[in-house]
Image (spheres, rainbow, N blue to C red):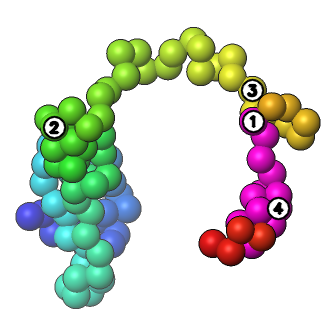
Amino acid sequence: MITANISKTKNELSRYLDAVRGGDTVLILDRNRPIAQIQPLSGGMGSESPRILELEATGAVTRPKKKNPAWAQTLEPLTTGQKGFVGSVGALLDERESGR
């Protein structure tokens, strides 16, 4: 773990961020007292999270073939009057009437 005071962190932020990209953790000190920590993203934060990998291994999810499929850009949101449209107020009223 790398430790650095606030002033040194401000002056050399790029250097510390490069270290974090490399897997190190940086502990920020204020008058030699720890106040913050910069660490690489992991856990549930990225697309390579253990949970996503587990779901992919079981076949519950599959990754897209392309990052930005062209068809997704042509989709338009449904508007009132279109088949399949359900407004939020209408959905709430339906739920209330059905007693759910």
- Residue underneath mark 2: 58
- State the separation of the CA atoms marked 4 and 2: 38 Å
Vertical placement of residue 98 versus 42, above or below: below
* N-terminal-most mark, 3 or 2: 2
Can residue 57 be seen here? The reply is yes
Residue drawn at x 89%, y 40% as measured from the top left: 80
Q: Which residues are magenta?
A: 84-96
- State the separation of the CA atoms marked 3 and 2: 33 Å
Query: Picture coordinates of residue 64 (x, y %)?
Result: 37, 22
> Is the residue marked by circle 3 packed among few (<14), some (14-19), or many (20+) residues within 10 Å?
few
Residue drawn at x 17%, y 48% as measured from the top left: 50
Residue extending farthest left? 1
Q: Amino acid at mark 1?
A: Gly
Q: Is residue 77 left or right of residue 59?
A: right
* N-terminal-most mark, 1 or 2: 2
- Residue underneath mark 3: 76
Marks 3 and 4 close (CB-CB < 8 Å) = no
As drawn, the label of residue 89 is 4
- Residue underneath mark 1: 84
* N-terminal-most mark, 4 or 2: 2
- Work out which quarter of the rendered image holds the N terminus and state it: bottom left
Q: Amino acid at mark 4?
A: Val
Tag 2, which secondary structure? helix
- State the separation of the CA atoms marked 1 and 2: 32 Å
Q: Is residue 88 magenta?
A: yes
